[in-house]
Image (spheres, grey):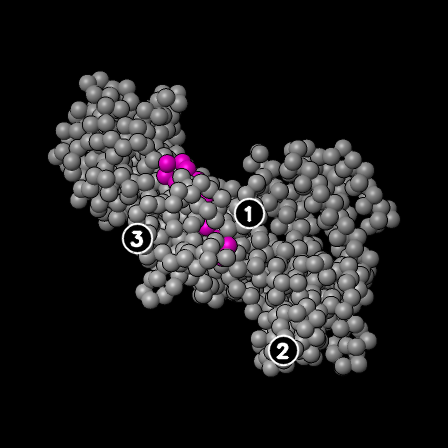
Amino acid sequence: MSAMRVMIIDDAALVRLYYRDTLERAGWHVEEALNGLEALEKLLRQPVDLLIVDINMPKMDGITFLNTLRRQSGPIAGIPALIISTESAPQDFAAAREAGANFYLVKPIQPDVLLAHVTLLCGAAS
Amino acid sequence: MNEFLEQFLIESRELIAQATDDLLALEHAPKDAARLDSAFRAFHTLKGAAGIMDFDAMGLVTHATEDVLSTLRAGDRAVTPKLVNNCLACLDQITAWLVAMEESEALPEEADADAAGLIARLIPSPRPEQPAPVPAANPGEPTLPAHAAAILQEQIEVLALPQDEGTPGRTAAAMRVMQNIFTRFGLSAPAAPTEPATEDTARPQRMDMARIETLVNLAGELIVVKNAYGHAVSLAPSPALTKLQAQLDRLTADMLRGVLAARVLPLRHVFQRFPRLVREMAASLDKPVRLVTEGDATEADKRIVETLFEPLLHVLRNAVDHGIEPPGQRAAAGKPSPAIIRLSAARQSDEVVIEIADDGRGIDPAAIRATAAKRNLATPEALAAMPEPELLELIFAPGFSTAGAVTNISGRGVGMDAVRAAITQLGGRVTLHSTLGTGTTIRFHLPFTIMLTRVLTVEAGGQAFGIPFEAVVETQQFNRKDIAAFGAAEAIIWRGKTVPLISLAATLNLPDTPPAGIIHTVIVEHGGEWGAIRVDRFGDQLELMLKPLDGLLSGMQGIAGTALLGDGRVLIVLELNEVLK
């Protein structure tokens, strides 16, 4: 079975490195994007199995990105998405859910927690 | 509740059940070294658990019991009923403490004094040593981890969001996540039939029931969302939405099957209460009786397991009171003492079969005939001609009792009809076999899980009702002129058959507006009775998880249960028995 593909969408290089390191050690194939716009462009060329999305990003934030993604036609609209953000207010959770997030974790996040959630959220298109 | 305390309570209760079982077995087989070891280990582990929780009173009591059991192991002392009673009293006290801890998360003040009293009974001079430290208890192995349950729950929230252009994408993503979790935890596969496990292979099951119960409720709500989604799709059909709907249908069905298969308990939870109850019943009647339980690791739906106590208690009471002969009669018949009542369970494909078999006097057909005649259940001629199996069935008739005299143990006005009603309500059936002089066997055949009910929704008197689909023959419209009057009653001719016309609104004492032209009816057949139920309009067909009535509605006639609808309304599902009367 080919490795599952995850795209990390976060503007902070250190965060991307941390996730990438954790996930690659566990056998995942990792893609990166610095903001929502770049993620959309990359996804239209090559879909992945799971998105890890930050909320506060330049050019296109995570909520706008998810809203746009879920309204696409074709299979990329249904890629599961995990929000990992420092925002922890109930209205942030609600906004993420309405935009199309499948789960929400609050930073900082331990490697084992990240892996446990990524493993369950990642779903190949049927 | 704190996680340590929760685990402590679960584990302690399992150990108490084990120790109780072992002690009762030892009473009958004092030389059973394996049982003695098992009881010793159970007390030892209880002591360790008490140590971890800084629960001194329980530590001292278990320590003293352990001491007593070790003198038995060394052969310095013999097992006596008094000794067993004292050890059981300790377990009762610990059980009471656990209840107190669960309720208030603290120990009752008098715990130390109670402990001292128990220890004084056990051993004349207690040695108040500190309990020895033991290794930490094994943590439980939940079948569905908390984060998986949380993720599933979130997907259900996502599916319940109001519709907008993002809905197809969100639904697809949520379903991919759910599918993945089902696959990983094997939830979509129906539970494999298990061999009836013996006590030796039975592993303690420490699933977090509250968590699973949450999932079952969420699955029920998901079905509601699914139904609402189906309705929305029918308003604006599109190939993509229809495809998603089919997927959603399949997934929700899989999910419900999966979570219901997880919501199982071993029958031990109810079986373990009986050895002591039977012991006490038998003692009060001066009948030496031994209850043997088998297959108590067999699993069934939690709701079934929890509902079984009363019916089983009733059948066991009957067995001890009426089935088992007084010791003199048994001896005269050359039967062994103690009498044996066997309570066993086994999984047979989709059924769980529970059997209560006694080696008592059996049921005398002549006595049934006499009682049935006295109660006017049938004419003497009919009774004389009645074949034996049919005669035995009369025991399940309301108000039947063959007891010559009312005793404290049975004869409290609850008959076998109540037992049959309880088992039928769970979707099961009861059978009875009896051989005069040899004994009686009663079997409960129960479904492994609680099933979905398919209903046709209708409106009458401004309210929505559900009619169980299995009773619906067809929906039919008639003209006013098709109605024939028979005195005050009305009927319609349907396929050459005269079927009584019943206004649902009038039956339920709701405002009834007799229609001017076309009337809408649901033709139903239930228990051999036919009816054309007049309603205001037909609704959708739905699959529901029926909730039994509780609170104010419980005991209301004509209602089988309720279910929540997609728009938040409560749907009342009808019990056709009553409507057709």
> Who is closer to the viewer here, B20 or B368?
B368
Write down the chain letter for disc 2: B
Q: Earlier in the sequence, mark 1 or mark 2?
A: 2
- The answer to whether B255 is drawn above or below residue B24 in the figure is above
The numbered disc on residue B479 is 3
Q: As rendered, which of B416 and B360 lies closer to the eye?
A: B416
Q: Is residue B127 magenta?
A: no
Question: Which quadrant of the figure has residue A59?
Answer: top left
Of the two numbered discs 3 and 2 in the rendering, the one whose residue sits closer to the viewer? 3
Horizontal and vertical percent for residue B466?
41, 48
Q: Tag 1, which chain?
A: B
| Mark number displayed over residue B556 | 1
Q: Amino acid at mark 3?
A: Asn
B365 versus A10 height, above or below: below
Drawn side of residue A44 relative to residue B498, left or right = left
Amino acid at dot 1: Met
In the image, the segment drawn in magenta is B564-578
